[in-house]
Image: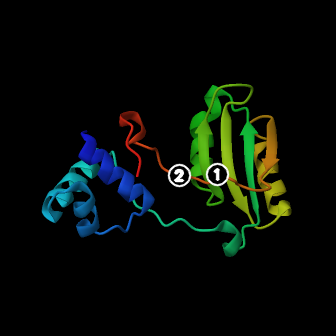
Amino acid sequence: MDDIDKKIIQTLQRNARASLKNIAEKTFLSSPAVSSRIEKLEREKVITGYHASVDPMKLGYHIIAFVNLDVSPVDKIPFYASMEAIPNVLECNCVTGDYSMLIKVAFESTMELDVFIGQLQKYGKSNTQIVFSTPVGPRGVDVMAEIGVKE
């Protein structure tokens, strides 16, 4: 992956709807050349998808929480399947430390969160933090940082 690919990735992370023409202007390539590079990045699974960022609060999900959970290794496969099936689970990460899983969830109420946590108890002990605010929200990887390029 060269600096032009990184510039394309950086642009798409900021705005997945950026036009080929816009990206071509930023990279000094033709639109077909940009399209070809994007297709290659998708084939190589560097670009894994395109998503709309939404505000959970405006959709009625007033409770965002992180749940730490200690899952035994033998329960991981059924646990992963269970988490995959629950739409309120935004992320499920296998982590190091006192707990083996870190789960990000969104619920409309604390009562729904409580029911979810109750269901998790069959997998092990948990610890939950409810988010008050998010001063730095989700963002992409700054692929240009390693070469010292900033926009």
Toward which corner of the image does residue 23 lie, by quadrant? Answer: bottom left
* Rendered residue at 57%/53% (across/down): 138
**Percent from the top left, x then y, of residue 121?**
79, 42
Query: Whole-percent x and y of residue 75?
Result: 64, 33
The structure residue drawn at horizontal position 58% and vertical position 43%, both measured from the top left corner, is 80
What is the distance, in whole Å, between disc 2 and disc 1 at their CAs? 8 Å
Amino acid carrying mark 1 in the image: Val
- Is 22 left or right of 68, judged from the image as shown? left
Instruction: Identify the element where label 2 is drawn.
Output: loop
Q: Name which residue lies at 35% across and 35% down.
A: 147
Residue under pointer 2: 139
The picture quadrant where one finds residue 15 is bottom left
Tell me the amino acid under the disc marked 2: Arg
Q: Residues within 10 Å of mark 2 (few under 14, many from 20)?
A: few
Along the line of sight, which residue is nearer the eye, 91 or 30?
30
Instruction: Please state the total of marks drawn on the protein image.
Output: 2
Please tell me how crowded label 1 is: few (under 14), some (14-19), or many (20+) other residues with Cα within 10 Å.
few
Q: Nearer the viewer, residue 104 or 34?
A: 34
x then y, percent, for residue 11:
36, 57
Left or right for 81, reference 140: right
Residue contact at pointers 2 and 1, CB within 8 angstroms: yes
Q: Determine which residue is flagged by label 1.
A: 136
Position of 85 with respect to 38 (left or right) is right
| Residue 119 seen by the camera | yes
